[in-house]
Image: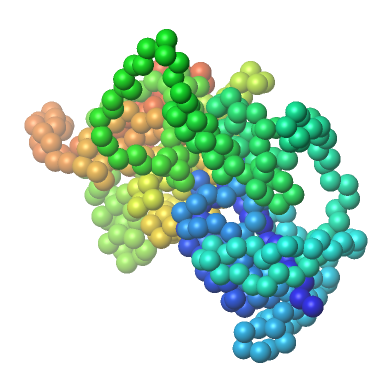
Amino acid sequence: MAQVLEFRLPDLGEGLTEAEIVRWLVEVGDVVAVDQPVVEVETAKAMVDVPCPYAGVVTARFGEEGSELPVGAPLITVAVGAAAPGGSPEAPGGSTEASGGSAGGSGNVLVGYGTSEAPARRRRVRPTPAAPAAANGRSVAAEPVEEPDDGPRAQTAGRADESGATVVDGPVPVISPLVRRLARENGLDLKDLTGSGRDGLILRADVEYALRAAAVQTRTAPVPAATPVTAPATTPGGTRVPLKGVRRAVADKLSRSRTEIPDATCWVDADATELMRARAAMNATGAPKISLLALLARICTAALARFPELNSTVDMAAREIVRLDAVHLGFAAQTERGLVVPVVKDAHARDTEALSAEFARLTEAARTGTLTPAELTGGTFTLNNYGVFGVDGSTPIINHPEAAMLGVGRIVPKPWVHEGELAVRQVVQLSLTFDHRVCDGGTAGGFLRYVADCVEQPAVLLRTL
């Protein structure tokens, strides 16, 4: 008899608590192998293909494309050891031992799913009255489901109220902090809800359904005769766009930055003619091309070596400024999914050619949506080249929890006094937004002036190479 195993949305790391289903990669009835991707999800960080640790036949899928699931919610169920639709006795991957059963284990590591042999556990058979409904309306015949006995579960004490319903007095079965927050912000008592998840787990959908039901009940409640009825406030028509995924992550981070960081901005115009000539000379040698962003990044790392206050973060809990040893340089990249900030790790240890290659790799990954969460986190300073949008200046919001961001506008021909005479030169506006808690205007101005000097006279960099 086939053993039906439930695969839940794993912890994808980086503190993420939920993900949106973008595209299902398998159908009910499909045969899957160990570590075969079964669904593509979008988190607040990146697009991720989620591999299944079991081999067998997919018996059910949970969640429609476009819906959000909390970490720990069921994704699919797999019948391990069931005959494949073509009549083969086993699913690809051989026996259960070779497919993540008692011996082998999954090769791809997911948080909460190991690759080594799990300790022996007692199992108990839980009869299921019906097979779970698939997302596309298909299902398979119900069979007894063996589930691991992980020891005593959290017991939920209860008592009967006047109507005979059970009122929960003990712990409420909720695993998602987002569900608790949603209920708390709307004044909803989770003890009054019955969860639709496994073992009565309360899901986000349960809370949202209860809130909608309460809203409908409020709208349809009879109004006492003595209570004057006021007309509802009218709002202009429009389209509501859900704030989720990358857009929500950006909104949360920028809001936190504006709330916590007392920022200030200074700027200066610089003659970039010599920098452009130096880049043209480098690229005329036949070696790999050097991007302008890489040259600006090399200038940034040299400036941060002179002014380390700007490569820091503020720990308000400890009332300390933490100056960081390594420079992990983030750069703003606009994609179809929105604004993302890939991070060049250890930028201070890379030469200009290596920086250019890494910028090219991360930019391509950003465009294709294949950046990993690790490549989008850990930045200590951000370089923002908004000149690609055809604008001269900006006052960007600091990428929390960093302490500063250098902005670079477009480089355009402008009248400029050069060597005592008026000439047409390639001019760029540079701006520095900084956390006023980590330094004062003197430090910020010194940093920006050094960057401008390197832009105007690239030979200044030779002193730090």
For residue 415, side relative to residue 389 (left or right): left
Rendering quarter of residue 110: bottom right
Residue, x 30% and y 40% (percent of image)?
Answer: 239
For residue 440, side relative to residue 94 (left or right): left
For residue 88, side relative to residue 204 (left or right): right
Rendering quarter of residue 369: bottom left
Measuring from the top left, give residue 391's x and y in whole percent. 22, 38
Measuring from the top left, give residue 437's x and y in whole percent. 51, 18
Residue, x 39% and y 27% (percent of image)?
Answer: 433
Quadrant in which the N terminus appears: bottom right
Nearest the camera: 187 or 78? 187
Nearest the camera: 83 or 256? 83
Q: Residue 160, can we see it?
A: yes
Nearest the camera: 32 or 172? 172
Measuring from the top left, give residue 210's x and y in whole percent. 56, 36
User: What's the colour scheme?
Assistant: rainbow
| Residue 370 to residue 376: above or below | below
Specify the farthest residue to the top: 226
| Residue 300 to residue 277: above or below | above
Residue, x 83% and y 72% (percent of image)?
Answer: 103
Nearest the camera: 243 or 273? 243
For residue 440, side relative to residue 59 (left or right): left
Specify the farthest residue to the left: 422
Rendering quarter of residue 76: bottom right
Residue, x 44% and y 28% (percent of image)?
Answer: 219
Q: Residue 331, can we see it?
A: no
Number of marks in the image?
0
Measuring from the top left, give residue 195's x and y in whole percent. 67, 44
